[in-house]
Amino acid sequence: MRQYIFKMPDLGEGTVDAEIVAWHAKPGDQVSEDQLIVEVMTDKAAVEVPAPVSGKVVSVTGAPGEKVAVGAPLIVFELNDAAKPADGSTAAAPPAPPAPSAAQPAASLASGTRQGRVMASPANRRRAREAGVDLRTVAGSGPGGRIVRGDLEAAIAPAAGLKTAAGPAAGPETTEIKVIGLRRLIAERMSEAKRNIPHFAYVEEVDVTELESLRQHLNLGEQKGGGSLSYLPLVVMALIRALESFPQCNVLYDAARGVLVRHRAVHVGIATQTPDGLKVPVVRNAQSLGVWEIAAEIRRLAERARTNKATREELVGSTITVTSLGKLGGIASTPIINAPEVAIIGLNKAVERPVVHQGAVVVRRIMNLSSSFDHRFVDGYDAAAMIQVLKDLLEHPATIFIPTVKS
C-alpha cells in the first residue's frame, strides 16, 4: 500500500494559511475521490475541499479553529491499489492520528459513524459544530437520510449539562463555544474596523409615505421571475444618485499605500444575515441596473449567501455598504463600516406615526437612516449633506428615476 500526502492547497490571492472549520473525514475512514473531506476558511471565503484520491484516511492535521499553512501536510491517505493521484504521491511514515480533544470529540471517532457526505442544512451544521456533535454519528430522519433539527436536538440532549460553571458553589449550566470560522473572521474584522476607523454617526428621519405608495404601485405589476420590491432596491437606486454629488463616499482606503481609491462604478455591498453569521454579497455596477434588476440581484445574492453557495467574487469588492434589519430595524443604529470602505448606510424600521405635515397633524410613514462615515476622509458636513440629498430623493421618489442633466 502506498501513502499519499495531501497538502493544504493554495486558495489564491496571497493566502498563506487557512483555518480548519470542520472535518468530514477522520482516521480510519474510507473516502472516494471528490468526496468532501474538510471545510476551511481563509480571510476571504469559506472553501469546501474534496478528496484528491480514493483511499483510507491515515491522519489529519489540525482541529477546528486551528490554522494550517499553505503547502503543509493536511491529510494522509493510504491508497487503494487502483488509486492514481493526479499530482503524484509521497511515501512517508504515517503520522500518529491526533487524540480526541474538545474540538474533536471522542464521539466523532466512534466506529459507528456513517461514510460519505452528511446531508444537513448550514444552520444545523453550525449548531452541531458549536455543540461538539459529529453529524456522521447522527441518524437522519429526513428525505434520503437528511438530518433535520429534531435529529440534531436528540443528539445534543445527552451531552447537555456536562459543563458547569466553576466556583465555590455550583453555578448555572454553561456551554463553551469556540470562536472559529466565519464567526472568528467577523469578530476580527469588526474589532479592526472599530479600532482603526474613527466612526462619525449620523441619523436622519425620512418620510417614506410617497416611497411606500410607489413601492406598492410597482408591485401591482408583478415582474417575471417573481418577488416584490422592498425598500432596499429603491434605497440603493437613490444612493447611486446621491453619490453622483458625493463621490468621496464611494471610496476604498488602501492603508498600506496611504491612498484613497475613488470608484466611478458603484458596487453596493448588501449586509445579509445567514445561519453562519453576517455576509456582505456585492451588487456589482449597480449604477447600470434598473430597480427590478437590483431587486432580483439582491434576492439572488442573499439566497446564495444564506445557503453557503456564494463565490469569493460575489463576496468581495464592494465600495459602499447598505445594511437593513427590516422589521427588527428599531429606531436607530450605529452600523460599523465595512473596511476598507468609508461609508455605510443603515435602514431602520418604517412605522406609521402622527407628524406635522403641511401645517396639520397627519399619519405618515417614517423611517430613520442611520449611517456611519470614516471621519478621517469624510467631513461631518459632507456626510450630513449626502444624507440630506438621499432623504430628499426618498421623500420625492419620482426624482430617483429622472436622469441627471450634465453640463
Image (spheres, rainbow, N blue to C red):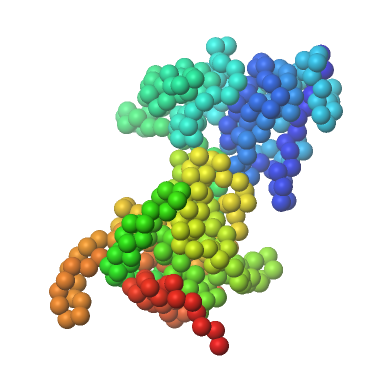
**Residue 21 picture location, percent across and down:** 58, 35
Tell me if residue 381 comes above or below residue 274 in the rendering. Answer: below
- Name the image quarter holding the N terminus: top right
The answer to whether residue 29 is left or right of residue 296 is right
**Residue 41 picture location, percent across and down:** 61, 41
Considering depth in this image, is 297 or 391 the residue closer to the camera?
297
- Name the image quarter holding the C terminus: bottom right
Q: Is residue 378 visible?
A: no
Considering depth in this image, is 194 or 304 the residue closer to the camera?
304
The answer to whether residue 391 is left or right of residue 184 is left
The answer to whether residue 6 is left or right of residue 65 is right
**Residue 98 picture location, percent across and down:** 65, 23
Q: Image point 49% across, 58% down: which residue?
A: 293
The extreme left residue here reads 361
Q: Image point 71% across, 51% down: which residue?
A: 13
The answer to whether residue 68 is left or right of residue 93 is left
Q: Quadrant of residue 238?
A: bottom left
Considering depth in this image, is 341 or 214 the residue closer to the camera?
214
